[in-house]
Image (cartoon, rainbow, N blue to C red):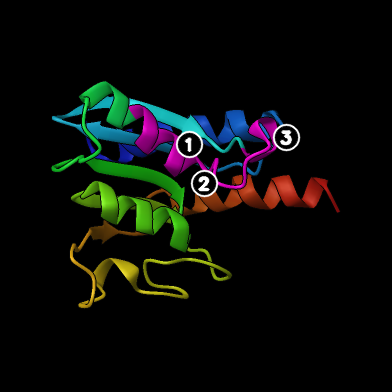
Amino acid sequence: MSDLEFMQVALEEAASAGTAGEVPVGAALVLDGKVIARSGNRTIRDKDPTAHAEIITLREAARVVGNYRLGGATLYVTLEPCIMCAGAMIQARIARVVYGADDPKGGAARTCFRVFSDPQLNHRVEFTSDVLAAESASLLQSFFAARR
């Protein structure tokens, strides 16, 4: 499967999260060419400020693999990760992140912060941005427009 196909999985999770009343962000973790974990945001449902799609997906992937280190994995996410999620990806030793839309108010890959390439940190994460960005942004825009 390609980046576009894996990002479609993340978009499905984002759409499900939006339908459930959560901010529509979705993630899917791929290891050895297979999706091993996926989720949408669950902060409201779980009453947990850390229940971002990326964090839930990392937790599930670590359980599946049996290790908190997820070397060689790629995480697909519909929105540029925040600093919390980027930090978790670094701790998990994710190899690569592929994301859709930039987050101008909190993105940690390139928009507000550049965590993945910070030379002071002990791990670098490659990232690819703008993969199905219009679709990702559209989900978010529709969600917030309906609430205004």
On the image, which quarter does residue 45 sit in?
Answer: top right
Which residues make up the magenta segment? 43-60
Residue 54 visible somewhere in the drawing: yes
SS at mark 3 in the image: loop
What residue type is disc 2 on? Glu
Q: Which residue is mark 3?
A: 21
Q: Which residue is mark 2?
A: 135
Q: Is residue 121 magenta?
A: no
Residue 29 circle label:
none
Q: Is residue 56 magenta?
A: yes
Whole-angstrom CA distance, mark 1 to mark 2, is 8 Å
Whole-angstrom CA distance, mark 1 to mark 3, is 15 Å
Whole-angstrom CA distance, mark 3 to mark 2, is 18 Å
* Quarter the C terminus occupies: bottom right
51 or 21: which is nearer to us? 51
Q: Is residue 18 left or right of residue 119?
A: right
Q: Which residue is mark 1?
A: 11
